[in-house]
Image: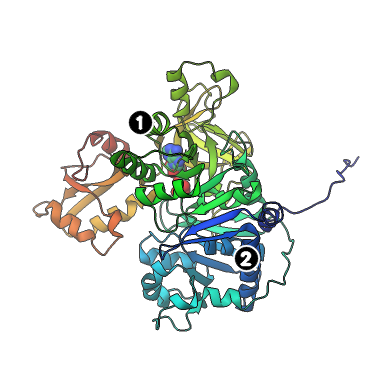
Amino acid sequence: MSSLMGQMMRMPLMISSLLLHAARHAGDTEIVSKRVEGDLHRYTYRDAELRARKVAQALARLGCRPGDRVATLAWNGYRHFEIYYGASGSQLVCHTINPRLFPEQIAWIANDATDQVLCFDATFLPLVEKLAPAMSTVKHFVLMTDRAHMPESSKIANLLCYEDLVEAENGDWAWPEFDENTASSICYTSGTTGHPKGAVYSHRSSVLHAYAAALPDAMGCSSADVILPVVPMFHVNAWGLPYSAPLVGAKLVFPGPHLDGKSLHELFESEGVTFSAGVPTVWLGVINHMKAKELKLSTLRRTVIGGSACPPAMMRTLEDEFDVQVIHAWGMTELSPLGTLSKLKAKHQALPLEAKHRLLEKQGRSIYGIDMCIVGNDGRPLPWDGRASGDLLVRGCWVIDGYFGRDDSPLREVDGRQWFPTGDVATIDADGFMQITDRSKDVIKSGGEWISSIDLENIAMAHPAVMEAAAIACPHPKWDERPLLVVVRRPGKELSREEMLAYFEGRIAKWQIPDDVVFIDEIPHTATGKMLKLKLREQFRDHKLPTV
Ligand code: AMP
């Protein structure tokens, strides 16, 4: 007997519907952006929706066809927001590239994604001029500025002006509806071994994530909020805020490239920001500035901190001294990105303050749409008792099931179902609070950005005086982690710390160069010859970096 089917409209979940909803129901709500030039730009959701339609028309006029990739190298701003919607909403794929990567890596990513168009902020003109010849698939380079700010000449032939493209269109165009599983955007992660890998999001996954992220036990967004995403739009879509804000009709404030403590504090205050989100390093800058100048936060009431573990001391400072509730969150590019957020349940309200703090310092509980489990070395699920610690696996509506252009599946089977291994090691307590205790993947996270330990080791090992090298994460008060290079010299060869560090210059982005080098006689190995990083990390846990 066949099942009875529901008789509800099959309305596909389209990213464009979020902006359309905001334009209709919060049409006069503002989007304020600090531009690269330093001035403030203001307009409304109604204006943004019209201009996003014009962007869609302009991209079609440039010859883009469904599925084509439109890349961005841009800060958080209204033009970037328009491309998010104009590209995805017209069945193209918005590919946000992280400009902090090493230039060769940026070109590699653009080629891997076969980007057709690259839109970029003026900040990145010298970078794009250098990389353009290596970006073999990009047909159009678009500078995200107006005619008055276009350079007189550029090494890029036929450099296009964003505002010229938008102004040439009339907006007489309607958002199409298509299969909700169509790709909407791509984000590359370097938080894995080897080359960066692309996570391809769909309209369905992005809209469901936007719903879930806005819930009270998640980010708790509402139309009464003024939201300033500090987390960049090139970092997993600014944790989905450019989608959740229009969904609820909240005012949006974009900080552009001005991410220092002083600029952010000024913007929080002048725009009446109530809610923000960013990595711990950013908040350190804001706190230091406020303390030095004896400033307060008059409207900011809560912030999500994630991307790296939020130090408990930072939570205390923001809550006790600045009256800002900290919501500790965990996520990853492969989850677009939210997985868990730390919010108390009703039964926890009566706990003593200390006990509440201990819970809120954990990475939190999963939101509906994400399921998680921890498994031991034998691959079997471990109990949720807050003590057993194992590999954290997740599954859900916004978890990838493969990487762009790769046939090998990253998924693992547990109890007959497919799960995505996060590379994090965690405990989960009986109330579902997950706490990260370690990381099984071999990468270093500095200020919210990944540094590949393998890249560092490969460079070091190419030096004629190096026999073996291991790059490990060393705790750092500002950057959370910084790379420490542990080196075994070749017998009879001389090599100083300074010579080793100088060897990295020009071979990797400056901020990825290790902070320090230590020389030892032997690196510990497993029986199969793999370096025992865990042991090294323990050995150098208290190593004092010269940058501290
Ligand atoms: P990304 O893909 O760059 O967003 O990085 C995701 C990874 O960052 C996770 O797998 C964790 O290793 C780490 N991470 C994210 N949030 C947290 C957090 N709140 N605490 C500890 N590690 C985190």
Task: Write down the residue under mark 2.
Answer: 52
Q: Position of residue 188 (x, y in %)?
A: 48, 57
Q: Quadrant of residue 455?
A: bottom left
In this rendering, does residue 288 appear at all? yes
* 254 sits left or right of 100 in the view: right
The answer to whether marks 2 and 1 mark residues whose Cβ atoms lie closer than 8 Å is: no
Q: Is residue 439 above or below residue 44?
A: above
Per the rendering, the mark at residue 350 is none
Which image quarter holds the N terminus? top right
Task: Write down the residue under mark 1.
Answer: 313
Neighbours of disc 2 within 10 Å: few (<14), some (14-19), many (20+): many
Q: Position of residue 101 (x, y in %)?
A: 38, 60
Amino acid type of disc 2? Ala
Q: Quadrant of residue 24?
A: bottom right
Which image quarter holds the C terminus? top left
In this rendering, does residue 377 appear at all? no
Which of the two discs, 2 and 1, labels the residue nearer the N terminus? 2
